Amino acid sequence: MKPPKHKRRSVRSRQTVTSDATAVDLVMQLMAIEGRSGEEGQIAEFICQQLRQSGAPARSITVDRANRRTPIRGETGNLVFRLPGTIRSPRRLLMAHMDTVPICVGAQPVRRDGFIVSKNRHTGLGADDRAGCGVILNAAMQILRRNLPHPPLSFCWTIQEETGLHGAHYLNLSLLGQPRLAFNWDGGSPEKLTIGATGGYRMSIEIRGIASHAGGAPEHGINAIAVAALAISDLVHRGWHGDVRKGRKRGTSNIGVIRGGEATNVVTERVAIRAEARSHDPVFRRKILREIERAFQRAARQTRNVAGACAKVDIDTRLDYESFQLGPDEPCVHAAEAAVCTTGRAPIRAIANGGVDANWMVARGIPTVTLGCGQANAHTANEALNITAYLDACRIALCLAMATETGDGT
């Protein structure tokens, strides 16, 4: 039975209290630094500075060139810090992503009733995933400053996760030193272990109509916005938009971005749309894609001007990440569960309907379990970080970094 939280924390040592204060101060500094996808330069420099001040040799810190291959030509690549082991054990990887979503720009972290929130009520906090960055950075700093025993370790802070897991996709694996167990920190409670996640496709859709004067000769035009409206309405009414359920098949789709039109007195000629489709089942995911494509093609054929011309549609699709599920006996899962138990929490295995960096790590041959670190309401102005949960995540990360989850250092 899990002991009451007040009892777990009533006998903490002075060292623990000091470490907790350091960890909280660290994450508040991380969340105050702007760094949305492609603009992670400042946060990477802050992490490097903290590592160097803690005693990390400069040669142990490297940055890859993933940003030269990602869709956004970002300010920096993935940041990797490696430590040789002081105990004999397989190398371990601890990772988290540096970027935040745009709503978090301008965050002002403050403590309030056991949580950290943004004082600026119009912004998110950036706990997704600066809390993850803080968790693994704190573990690295504790090991360096306190000269703690540990197996060979690699720490990785990735870029451009929020825009499609691109940092993990293009990560230079040779910098990691062939880790055997990998742990990723992202959203949720510390006891949640994400052992599988959905796969996702992104779509770019361009509708080309015909421009004309909206008052003098609208019948000669073809309105690209009207075509888009027909297609989206078709998808909604036929159950292919949002929460998609067809028999036992499950998935999701979303029309996320629409851009087009410049004036009300012009029949809109072009509209650009960005959409996505997700499912754990690759075959059903492709079915969702086909239904989206067919809806836009039907709408284009149905929308004609007086001359009988119809709209044209160009659709481009790309796989952002494939779905995965770790096996029940995967060593990284068992290690993570044991580490969670050291905090008095009960581990819970979960399957995510969103992508995480582990999607690409698993696809590239590194089994990776994802753990939470106390974030809530991510991607909204109501985002918050539970301080107690965050500190437990820090303890779990340090336990895994030291390989002490079994209680014997192995």
Image (spheres, grey):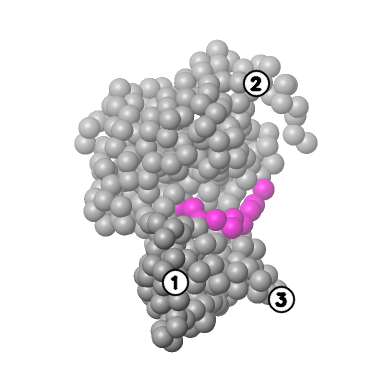
Residue name at image x 26 percent, y 43 percent = 75
* Nearer to the camera, 303 or 102: 303
Three-letter amino acid code at the position of disc 1: Pro
Image position, residue 176 (x, y; %): 33, 49
* Nearer to the camera, 323 or 119: 119
Residue name at image x 30 percent, y 52 percent = 72
- Tell me the element at label 2: loop
**Residue 375 sits in which quadrant?**
top right
Image position, residue 374 (x, y; %): 59, 36
**How crowded is the residue under tag 2: few (<14 C-alpha within 10 Å), some, or many (20+)?**
few
Three-letter amino acid code at the position of disc 3: Gly
* Nearer to the camera, 310 or 90: 310
Badge nearest the viewer, 1 or 3: 1
Of the image marks 1 and 3, the number of the one nearer the N terminus: 1
Residue name at image x 75 percent, y 27 percent = 4
Residue behind mark 2:
113
Badge nearest the viewer, 2 or 1: 1
**How crowded is the residue under tag 1: few (<14 C-alpha within 10 Å), some, or many (20+)?**
some
Which of the labelled discs sits on residue 52, or is there none?
none
**Residue 32 in view, yes or no:** yes
Residue behind mark 3:
247
* Nearer to the camera, 255 or 130: 255
Residue segment shown in magenta: 348-363
Q: Residue furthest bottom?
A: 308
Image position, residue 302 (x, y; %): 52, 82
Left or right: where does residue 265 sit relative to residue 336?
A: left
Three-letter amino acid code at the position of disc 2: Asp
- Tell me the element at label 3: loop
Mark 1–mark 3 Cα distance, whole angstroms, equals: 43 Å
